[in-house]
Image (cartoon, rainbow, N blue to C red):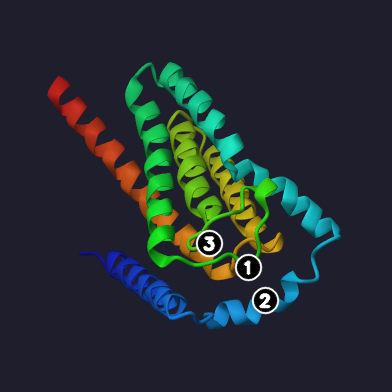
Amino acid sequence: MKKRHYILLFLFIMVATTIGAWILKITRGELPYVDQWTRGPVEAFPDTFIYTFFRAVTNLGSESFMYPFTIIVGIGLWILFKHWLPALIFAGGTLVSHLLNKLVKTLVNRDRPSILVEANAEGYSFPSGHAMITLVCYGLLAYFITTRMKNKKSIIIVQAAFAVLIFLIGISRYFINVHYLTDIMAGFFMGFFCLIGFIFLYETIQKRKDQSRG
């Protein structure tokens, strides 16, 4: 194993351990220190431009938008790649991450800091679905789009644009006070782990298909 792999493994273990510690505190009815430190600022955002901005951004990760978006993009990927596999990985990955998010939320059983039905913010809080599911959905979309591109500069621009979008959607849940910051951080981590897994699955299937043709 290369040194870089050891570093990544170490970072993964550290983050997973931290999230595990958060879950332990949450299930005991305690508030993780990160959430204690970040509760104050969020109370100053209502009726400001920041709140209005993030209230609009958060809709790009809400179920009312994501369901039709996933279907339309899935069909578009099928047409673009002229094969059902990218569409299946994209739509299936988004769905699986959604179900996994619901499962973890039920197991952790954490109440939200506040409820906002019109922003798709009801039910349990940990981890943030907007952070986790949009990272998988938009991450897979960015991956498939860039596999069709040859210009490295354009690839970097597209990846950066999607990364910013994913971050803004996830962090919007903190600014409109429907998630704790640890919910969002855990959502990003779990979403990234799922994203890597779905990309690995796609590339493995694709490689076996190419080998069988050869």
Which element type, helix, strand or loop, lies under badge 2? helix
Is residue 183 placed above or below 70 in the rendered structure?
A: below
Disc nearer the start of the sequence (1/2)? 2
Q: Residues within 10 Å of mark 2 (few under 14, many from 20)?
A: some
Disc nearer the start of the sequence (2/3)? 2
Q: Amino acid at mark 3?
A: Ser
Q: Is residue 153 visible in the rendered structure shown here? A: yes
Q: Residues within 10 Å of mark 1 (few under 14, many from 20)?
A: few
Cα separation between marks 1 and 2: 9 Å
Q: Position of residue 191 (x, y in %)?
A: 43, 53
10 lies left or right of 64: left
111 and 129: which one is in front? 111
Look at mark 1 in the image and give the residue it sits on. Answer: 113
Location of residue 123 (image quadrant)? bottom right
24 and 209: which one is in front? 24
116 and 83: which one is in front? 116
Query: Of discs 1 and 2, which sits in the foreground?
Result: 1
* Mark identifier at residue 39: 2
Q: Residues within 10 Å of mark 3 (few under 14, many from 20)?
A: many
